[in-house]
Image (cartoon, rainbow, N blue to C red):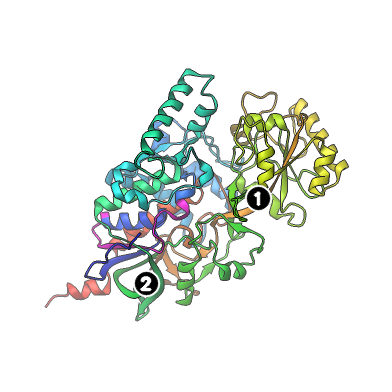
Amino acid sequence: MHDDAPPDDETYDLVVIGAGAAGMTAALTAALHGLRVVLCEASDQLGGTTATSAGTLWVPGNGHGIEAGHDDTREAAARYLEALQGPDDAHGLRRAFLDTAAEAIDFLERHSSVHFQSAGRHPDYMPLPGAAESGRALSPVEFDGRLLGSHFARVRPPMPDFMVLGGMMLGKADVQALIRRYRSPRAFVRSARLLARHAVDRLRYPRGTRLVLGNALVARLYDSLLRTGVPVRFGCALASLVRQEGRVVGATVVSGGRIDRLQARRGVVLATGGIGHGSALRRRLGIDPRIESLAFAGVRGDGIDAALAGGAALTCHLPALFWQPVSRVPDGAGGYRLFPHLYLDRPKPGLIAVDAHGRRFVNEASSYHHFSEAMLAHPDTAMPCYLICDADFVRRYGLGVIPPGTRRTGPWERRGYGLRAATLTELAGRLGIEAEALSETVAANNRHAREGVDPDFGKGSTILNRFNGDPSHQPNPCLGIIARPPFHALPVWPADAASSAGLATDADGVVLDEAGRGIAGLYACGNDMASVMRGAYPGPGTTLGPAIVFAYRVGRHAARTVSPAHEERHAPA
């Protein structure tokens, strides 16, 4: 792909670096407020990590949830975050987030192609005062990629393991329809329509154009930018920030082998994706080098590094990153890709996770972040841990990238994805763990499954556990026996999916220096900004919700700020 041709005039009101959800939202908001904006993206496609995500936003008190009848309020969310995090920070970021969350969504929906829907019942992750079972999670409305015309190729595709039939995207309801296609007339009709649409798509496009999840959010933001006239410069990487008399007045970028200087009257917004694969930042934060990242490969901490070089402060929350457990899927060429285990297998009945001693160490149905935290708490024995199940489980629920309905798992094992054995003793031997301990652990699980109670870790005891379990399975939707051979083991590691640590900012995304003073003309949002959650993980969409809200606040603040250049141009004669 070729870079979009740069405009003749290289002076803008706002220069935004990074075209993920946060960068696109900041650029769109500023443009809708009347600013002249340019959006720079280092790669040849936009969306970054957002494009491969589930696209869920955690937005307390949003209008869609209220309209759907879900009982949620800003005050309840404040109680929940207070219980989870303690008091608000000195700059009032949590208050700003809660006060602006619904407003940001309403603004985007009124003025752009960005539209959401309530995710319905989607429980918060921690059973604390103020937690909600429904209403806070928003999902992007599916989008027809054909509306983008030739620009559709600029939308980064999702992970290959989240597509079927060579490029068809599936939402959670689509997966259930395909699994039940021969058991329900409604599911059969939905499946038939999905397949027919995809067949037509593949006659003209390299992948399906029915976009859901994070891909739908990215496409809707891009469609809005195109309609608003915001230029996107692809292959345009940040080199440095330009400062004048203590104020950031522009950025130098590398584009097509040349260095350009973009002047910014109102400022520069950093939204380059956070820490990601940035080796220097990972070392600085003491991140275990064994931990890999699910972030887009182009995320290398460029925005954070550039700001730190200019005197910005780094806020180091603990943990510094937000986690997801992953398995390694061989790619056939000697390498592998990472597959996140979110909710499709871990919470289901008939699966346990064991450490290197063959013992359980965690509630397998806890959120992906908290499951990974348990692994990180035992790095010598639970990195990796092993998901253990039997043949019945694989047939019913699948395991990682092995789809439900699979009866012959030999081909997967020969590819190097997981192990299987006729007995638990043989499986333990292949894993190099204590056979007696594994057998005892499975026997205890089977007793608990029959009784319906997990006295060790409480699997199935919370609303979140039961939501992600199998409601048709009794007496506990998350506990099932492991008895029918062959027995399966899949190694799983913790990986980071987003940043908690990042640049210190005020409530409008203005970057702060080491003394806590705002750096005029410099903004950060998304993962470049230290998370308002301060290392806590309240619910689904913990990163994207604040990313959208604070990007909105950044664009709005930049539009309201009068720069010295603006004052000079409008000074009386």
Residue 195 as seen in the image, left or right of residue 558:
right
Name the side, left or right, on which 571 lies relative to 498.
left
The residue carrying mark 1 is 372
Q: Which mark is residue 253?
A: 2
Q: Position of residue 262 (x, y in %)?
A: 31, 72
Question: Quick one: quadrant of the C terminus?
Answer: bottom left
First in sequence: mark 2 or mark 1? Answer: 2
- The kind of residue tagged 1 is Ser
Determine whether label 2 and label 1 are within 8 Å by CB: no
- Image quadrant where residue 490 sits: top right
The numbered mark at residue 242 is none
Magenta residue span: 32-50
Report if residue 103 is visible in the image.
Answer: no
Residue at x 41% of width, y 49% of height: 99
Residue 549 pos. (x, y %):
41, 52
Identified by mark 2, the residue type is: Val
Q: Secondary structure at mark 1?
A: helix
